[in-house]
Amino acid sequence: MTKNWMTWLALTPWPLSAWAVDAQKMELGPVDFTPTLEVGERYDDNFRALDRDKDSAWITSIKPTFLFTRESRNSAYQLEYSADSQTYLGASNANHIDHDAVGRAAWAFDSRNRLDASLNYRRAEETADTASPDENDKYTQRGGRLKYAFGALSAANQLELATSYQQTRYRNGGGLNDDKDRNTSVVTGTWFHRIGGSTRGLVEASYGDYDYLDDNLRNSKSQRLLVGIDRDVSAKLSGTARVGYERKDFDSSASNDYGSGTWEVGMDYKPRTYSVFSVNLRRSFDEGDDGASTVHVTSSRLGWRHTWSAFFATDVSYRHASRDYLGTGGREDRLNVAGAELIYTATRWADVTLGYQRWDNDSNVNTEDYTRNIYLLSLKLSL
């Protein structure tokens, strides 16, 4: 495998996992197989995220993940599947198993032409902030993405063209959540220009089409234009920052159109190899919920992960999100989430994590106020 090919693979957003364990692979003929297992026990004192009559439970999670990989000189393939079994003690109506499957492929035809493709499937359930306080939101998502990149990695300019499609279908009975069933298509074009060293400037334009099956008032088109910078993951300060303008135009004249400044920032600062500070910022329009035609979200997350020794690491974070529900009576939510984890790496193949999260949602709609405390103990295993 050439150096350019390896560099391209490193820049391709294919996270194997966020685990501290050093997962090892085994060879199955021409394919590498990497199995992992996470077993967790947590206590959630308000897993329905309600303002009163709160439901609490001990929750047992068992999540195996299977990753199959094949690489050659000019191509790479991945197939990843995980099943997350969630068992709620004393609340069997919340029990569920989430299934996630992703297939990825990448080809480097020559030094200037590269192609990524992916297919994804997710069958999951949510217990918090649901349409009914007594039933999980049950949904299935399936879709795919195709991205073409032109320009050598060392060249002054590169161009990326991407398109994606996703179906979202809810499986609740009695018409519950039928108004959220939709098809989403997005086309994005990005031009990168190398400013110097590991930094590239960028200009990005995207167009999205949101087609609802049962709620025509939410059918819309979105357009975004952003400029920003992109820094190589090998740099001390790495990540991407984009800022620009976004419009959300609805097909129906009964729904108001909206426009706003928008930004996306995801940066890591590594003053030492064993310490990473992360900043994530986002301002954008999300799809409508709770009667709103769209939800305007401004969120920020600060995190710090520090490895104290070969055995111990800590991970602390704080997140704030402002959610303005547009096209309704003016609901506004302010969510704050603080969390901390202590990770003990017993061996190369095993991690033990002890964690805590505090959720506090303040809304101008009294029934949407809630607090939530989550205590976690998990074991992560690999070969």
Image: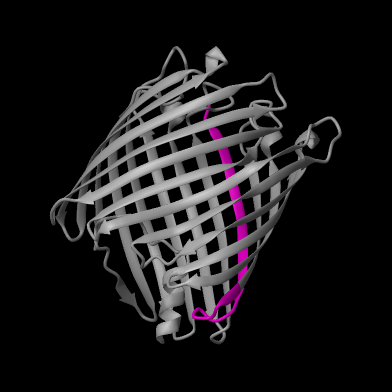
Residue 288: quadrant of the picture:
top right
Residue 212 at least partly seen: no
| 247 with respect to 236 (left or right) | right
Task: Point out the stretch of residues depicted in magenta.
Answer: 135-158
**Residue at image x 24%, y 61%?**
273
Camera-nearest residue between 244 and 330:
244
Q: Quadrant of the C terminus?
A: bottom left
**Which residue is most to the front?**
196
Residue 271: quadrant of the picture:
bottom left
Residue 257: quadrant of the picture:
top right
Vertical placement of residue 84 versus 82, above or below: above
| 57 with respect to 132 (left or right) | left
Q: Estimate the x, y position of residue 108 in percent, counting from the top left.
A: 53, 82
**Residue at image x 67%, y 36%?**
180
Magenta residue check for 289? no
| 240 with respect to 141 (left or right) | left
Classified by dominant secondary structure, the portion drawn in magenta counts as strand
**Residue at image x 42%, y 29%?**
336
Camera-nearest residue between 364 and 141:
364
Camera-nearest residue between 353 and 196:
196
**Residue at image x 54%, y 79%?**
107
Magenta residue check for 141? yes
Q: Quadrant of the N terminus?
A: bottom left
**Which residue is most to the right?**
253
What colouring style does the render use?
one colour
Q: Estimate the x, y position of residue 30 in percent, counting from the top left.
A: 39, 81
Q: Estimate the x, y position of residue 239 in percent, counting from the top left.
A: 44, 59
Residue 271 at least partly seen: yes
| 352 with respect to 208 (left or right) | left
